[in-house]
Structures are given as C-alpha cells and as structure tokens.
Image (cartoon, helix red, strand yellow):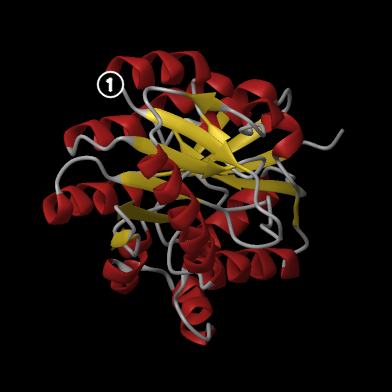
C-alpha cells in the first residue's frame, strides 16, 4: 500500500487517523497541529500559508496519496493572507469566494494538478462516525424535541449554503448561526444572547465530501455548552465524527446535557 501523507490541522482527529494508519508521513501545520502528533509518524512542520513548501515537501517524501484532517481557523486564512507565499496568494486570489468549501475544494484541485490523490479517510475513522439512534438522555422534553426538529433542518440549510455547520436554537427561535468564528464561539455567543436552555444542532453539507471538513464533536463542544447551560446537542447521524466516545458520554451525563443523532434524508 502506498505511503499516505496527512496534512494535519488542530484537534484529535488527525492524531486518531495517524494512530490507525500504519504508514503515514505527517505534514503538521505550525500553530495548529498538536505537538503529540509527532508520536505517530515522521512529522514535518509546515509554516502556515507556505503552499510551495508543502508541495516540495510532499514530493521529496515520495507522497502520492493525501488526507487532510483537523481544524484550521477560517479567520486565520483571511487575517494572515499577507504572510502567504506567492503560490498560496495566487491560488486564493483566483477563487470565486472565500467560503470554507471553496477554499478546501480549491486546495484539493491545486494539489491534484501536482499529481497527488486525495483519499477518503473514513475507513481509518469509521468507528468515530455517530451511528443512527445514538442518544444520551438527560431529560429530553417535548420542547427540546421540537427545537431539535426545528434546528437540525435549519442547520442543514446553513451547511448547504456553506455558511457554517451549526445553529443554536431556543423555543423555536434561531439564536446564533455559525460563521467564521467556529462552533465553540457560536455556542458562547448564543448564551450571551439567550441565556440557558439552548439547543445546539450540527450537520454536514448535502452530499458531504468525506475527504474534508466533516463535522466533529467532542469534549470541547460539551464544555462550551456547559458554560451557557445548554440543554441538548443534536447531530446528523452517519455524517459527524465523535471523539473520545466513552469520555464524551461520561462528560455529557456529568453536565446533564442530552445528545441525539438525527437521520436526515438528502
């Protein structure tokens, strides 16, 4: 099997992939990727926004197949554009807009032009996908069920527009929509606006490309929800990664947060 190159951003997802992949070379983005990722394969640290350096490093290490996992703050791309190399600036300048999907699909196409192939990482992460009928019930009232049904549909529409993956609702009102700030800041903003008992809903895009930007939830999500005393988290079944499942369930029960997966028809 060909050696796989992992372009790693922040979070546990790239570490989990590296643990499960026998032959991986890690291209870790400085100031984003976790230092611990070095334990799981040869690691090359990449200066953020240095596209030509990445391409040269991939070729020098005889990489043909690529996976891109982990979070890179969307706003950091906007704020640090002036620091990027010529290759990255030229690439970004040609994009029709700077939405997450546009940037990520553009990166894939740019690297494919150089002869690299992006592969679906799901076989290495399938145990993390939230199954249908997953539930942690810490008091799911009829009011919460209504907010879940309402919010998850709105979240899907927002995801399809590539605005964000998360909305926060309360009593049939849309309190906050995720934008460039990311999920955790969206949750905290909702708490400032509407107080406790909010419901957080997170989905993938329609026909989600599993090679990039698949929704992820974990302990950090629950911690943000605890800060605003949110009541429930709803996520799309089969299209969202759950990190550290046992600890997640334990923490959700500790914080009295209900979590449910919802099957959505595309």
Residue depicted at 61% across the width and 53% down the height: 212
Whole-percent x and y of residue 2?
A: 83, 37
Whole-percent x and y of residue 264?
A: 65, 52
Tell me which corner region of the image, top left, top right, bottom left or bottom right, holds residue 110.
bottom right
Instruction: Give the vertical position of 207 relative to 242 (above or below).
Output: below
Question: Is residue 46 in view from this perspective?
Answer: no
Residue depicted at 46% across the width and 44% down the height: 9
Residue depicted at 61% across the width and 33% down the height: 130
Image quarter in which the C terminus is found: bottom right
Image quarter in which the N terminus is found: top right
Query: SS of the residue at dot 1?
Result: helix
Residue depicted at 37% across the width and 36% down the height: 232
Whole-percent x and y of residue 201?
A: 43, 48
Task: Judge left or right: residue 173 versus residue 50.
Answer: left
Crowding near the residue tagged with mark 1, few <14, some 14–19, many ≥20 C-alpha atoms within 10 Å: some
Instruction: Give the vertical position of 29 relative to 116 (above or below).
Output: above
Task: Judge left or right: residue 139 versus residue 102.
Answer: left
| 81, 78: nearer the viewer | 78
Task: Judge left or right: residue 67 versus residue 231.
Answer: right
Q: Residue furthest front?
A: 142
Which residue is the site of mark 1?
A: 255
Instruction: Give the vertical position of 232 relative to 62 (above or below).
Output: above
């Amino acid at each position: 099997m060909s050696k796989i190159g992992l372009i790693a951003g922040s979070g546990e997802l790239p570490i989990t992939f590296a643990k499960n992949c026998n032959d991986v070379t890690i291209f870790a983005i400085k100031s984003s990727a976790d230092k611990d990722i070095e334990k799981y394969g040869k690691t090359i640290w990449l200066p953020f926004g240095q596209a030509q350096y990445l391409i040269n490093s991939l070729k020098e290490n005889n990489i043909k197949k690529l996976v891109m996992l982990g979070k890179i703050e969307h706003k950091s791309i906007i704020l640090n554009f002036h620091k990027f190399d010529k290759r990255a600036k030229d690439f970004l300048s040609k994009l029709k807009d700077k939405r997450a999907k546009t940037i990520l699909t553009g990166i894939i196409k740019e690297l494919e032009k150089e002869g690299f192939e992006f592969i679906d990482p799901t076989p290495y992460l399938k145990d993390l996908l939230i199954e249908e009928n997953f539930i942690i019930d810490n008091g799911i009232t009829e009011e919460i069920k209504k907010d879940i049904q309402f919010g998850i549909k709105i979240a899907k529409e927002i995801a399809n527009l590539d605005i964000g993956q998360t909305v926060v609702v309360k009593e049939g009102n849309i309190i906050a929509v995720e934008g460039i700030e990311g999920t955790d800041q969206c949750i905290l903003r909702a708490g400032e606006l509407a107080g406790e008992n909010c419901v957080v809903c997170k989905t993938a895009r329609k026909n989600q490309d599993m090679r990039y930007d698949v929704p992820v939830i974990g302990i950090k999500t629950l911690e943000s929800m605890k800060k605003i005393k949110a009541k429930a988290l709803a996520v799309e079944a089969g299209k969202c990664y759950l990190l550290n499942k046992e600890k997640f369930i334990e923490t959700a029960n500790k914080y009295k947060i209900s979590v449910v997966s919802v099957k959505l028809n595309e």
